[in-house]
Image (tube, rainbow, N blue to C red):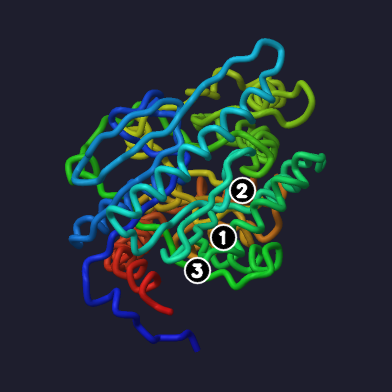
Amino acid sequence: MANTNISIMEKRKLNILYIATEYPSKKSPKLINYGGQASYLENISNLIRDKKHDVSIFLISDRYLKSVENGIRINQFGIKLKIPYFKKFANFLNNVLISIQLNLTVYSENKKKKFDVIQYPSFLNFGIILILPKKCKKICRISGVTKLWRQCNNKKRNFVHIFSDYLEKKRVQRAHKAFAPSNLISKKASIVYSKKIYTLSSPLVKLNRKILKSKTKQCERYLLFIGTLNRVKGIDLLASAFLKIFKKHKNITLKISGRAEDLGPNVNSINYFFKKCKNFKPRIEYLGILPKEKIFSLYSKAEALIIPSRLDNYPNVMIESILFKKPIIGFLNSSLEEVLDDGKTGFLGAKQNSENLYCKIDEFLTLSKSKKKDLNKNILNLRDQLKNIDYAENLINFYNKN
């Protein structure tokens, strides 16, 4: 039974600091190039601010800038030294200098504002070291376990990894409490970090009703993949599965959006995909990294979302798909099963391989009209259930519990 003793913090407004490596600030460069951590922080910080708590964000960036957006104070830290022929060393040195500036500012601001809670991510770039005030309650959010992600990507561990894994573990252990968005990662992280990890799911995205209810002309039938193109996200399994899907379903196309990473030495993921499906290139569209507005437009017209991750952590693309009432196709034991029921609100393969993925995509594409109607109704009910969760209140209660 969890400890339900509530501290005196519950009786007053909290002053909360979030330390982040990405946040969609309107005054940040490269606005579209951010991932799940930024989406989570944007959503939760605004929800907490709506409850009249003070929210500050210290953003590790590539420049120095202070701003206030929607009542949230944003302080960016950055430096960009360039050393010819020593790019990796320059990046490391940049991170060391940024961490010095970050820590000094945290201590300086804490003397004035007296932060009640400082929340930070488990992963930080090599060279970033946090030395936080002792009296603040320190909370660590685990969006991913680097060691597990590296294993899924078939990457060998080197000396830098050994040191960065050690720093990551210490960062989690030094927190008063730590949490992850999914039960799957909470359990795995508890073992890796030798610390109890709680579970707090990520909030739904706040969308304008016009976006959700906008009617668009359906020009083609397509399935959609959104995410980083690597082995963790199952891009290789997706390629193999669609080789068979394209053969059987002549009117289906595939749209892909996200950052392309290497699957191995000199093997770019999107090049691998097109090479694998070389006879069906006209039916594949790679869109690169897109801003949220265009991604939402893709959601609205897609038949379904494919999330073939080998390991995931309550992904934002799943939450967004549910908001748009779109079916999701993926695997069991990937964290999707914590929200979706196979055959009722999604399609989840029992084994994480291309054959199971193909079977689940085919199962969806061959549904009868009555079963599609039931599926849509179930997804709508699921969306309503998720909307009724007070995510900000859950997090505030988590902060307050001893």
Q: Which residue, given by chain and number where applicable, does mark 1 sit on?
A: 335
Residue lying at 63% horizontally and 57% vertically, measured from the top left: 349
Q: Earlier in the sequence, mark 3 or mark 1?
A: 3
Task: Provide residue 238's location: percent of width, then percent of height.
Answer: 64, 38
Q: Amino acid at mark 3?
A: Thr
Q: Is residue 314 left or right of residue 269?
A: left
Q: Earlier in the sequence, mark 1 or mark 2?
A: 2
Task: Provide residue 235's location: percent of width, then percent of height.
Answer: 64, 37
Residue lying at 33% horizontally and 29% vertically, measured from the top left: 65
Q: Amino acid at mark 2?
A: Ser
Q: Is the residue marked by circle 2 packed among few (<14), some (14-19), or many (20+) residues within 10 Å?
A: many
The mark closer to the camera, 3 or 1, is 3
Determine whether label 1 and label 2 are within 8 Å by CB. Answer: yes
Nearer to the camera, 293 or 275: 293
Q: Which residue, given by chain and number where applicable, does mark 2 sit on?
A: 309
Q: Against 377, is 248 above or below? A: above
Report helix, strand or loop for mark 3. strand
Q: Which residue, given by chain and number where applicable, does mark 3 sit on?
A: 199
